[in-house]
Image (cartoon, rainbow, N blue to C red):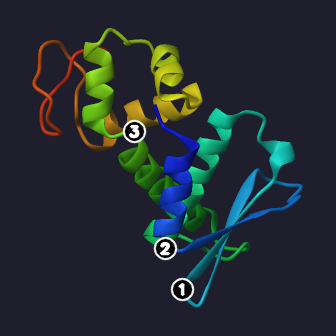
Amino acid sequence: MISLSDVYDALREQDARLFVYDIGFTAAATIEQDGKYAVFYDPSAVRTTAALKECLAHECGHCATGATHRVASPWDLIEKHEYKANRWAIERFLPYPALCRAMRAGLTEPWQLAEWFDVPQSFIERALSYYHEARGLRFSPDAPDSADAECSGLGA
């Protein structure tokens, strides 16, 4: 399970300041100035604690990777930075070995994993896709608990 405290701790590690603000057009945004980060989140756009954890983990990923851009940046740069932030959040909060342990315990459906880790199913699906497609890792039966090995669960 991922706690909100874990996410707040990660933000503190990045020396990021967190502000509640009615953004109006998105759930959260990260701003960088002179190597310092401010994360703004709009509570009216985040309806559950699970969604808040995913949202703030992603924004912390922007801080940790330095993947910020100007609002008017080209779409390909924005997508690259979003991917980096997502990758960081997945590796930090949904590490491959933890997913493997949960799957070996019988949690093989994305919704089951989402309930176990207390994050939105979309975050789990993004993590499974990342580990399978980008990292070439598999989720298959009876493998040891190592980042280079396959684990039981989804036959991805």
Q: Earlier in the sequence, mark 2 or mark 3?
A: 2
Q: Is residue 80 visible?
A: no
Could you tell me if the residues under marks 1 and 2 are in contact, i.e. CB atoms within 8 Å?
A: no
| SS at mark 3 in the image | loop
Please state if 25 lies on the left or on the right of 64 as rendered. Answer: right
Q: Which residue: 61% across, 74% down? A: 69
Give amino acid for label 3. Answer: Leu
Residue 14: percent from left, percent from top: 48, 70
Residue 56: give its label.
Answer: none
Residue placed under numbered mark 2 in the picture: 66
Give the quarter of the figure containing the N terminus.
Answer: top left
Give amino acid for label 1. Answer: Gly
Q: Which residue: 31% across, 17% down? A: 103
Q: Earlier in the sequence, mark 1 or mark 3?
A: 1
From the image, state whether disc 2 or disc 3 is nearer to you.
3
Q: Which residue: 56% across, 32% down? A: 119
Q: Earlier in the sequence, mark 1 or mark 2?
A: 1
Which residue is nearer to you in this view: 141 or 98?
98
Residue placed under numbered mark 1 in the picture: 35
Estimate how packed mark 3 is, as few (under 14), some (14 to 19) or many (20 or more) residues with alpha carbons within 10 Å: many
Which residue is farthest bottom? 34
Please state if 21 lies on the left or on the right of 132 as rendered. Answer: right
Q: Which residue: 11% across, 21% down? A: 143
| SS at mark 1 in the image | loop
Estimate how packed mark 1 is, as few (under 14), some (14 to 19) or many (20 or more) residues with alpha carbons within 10 Å: few
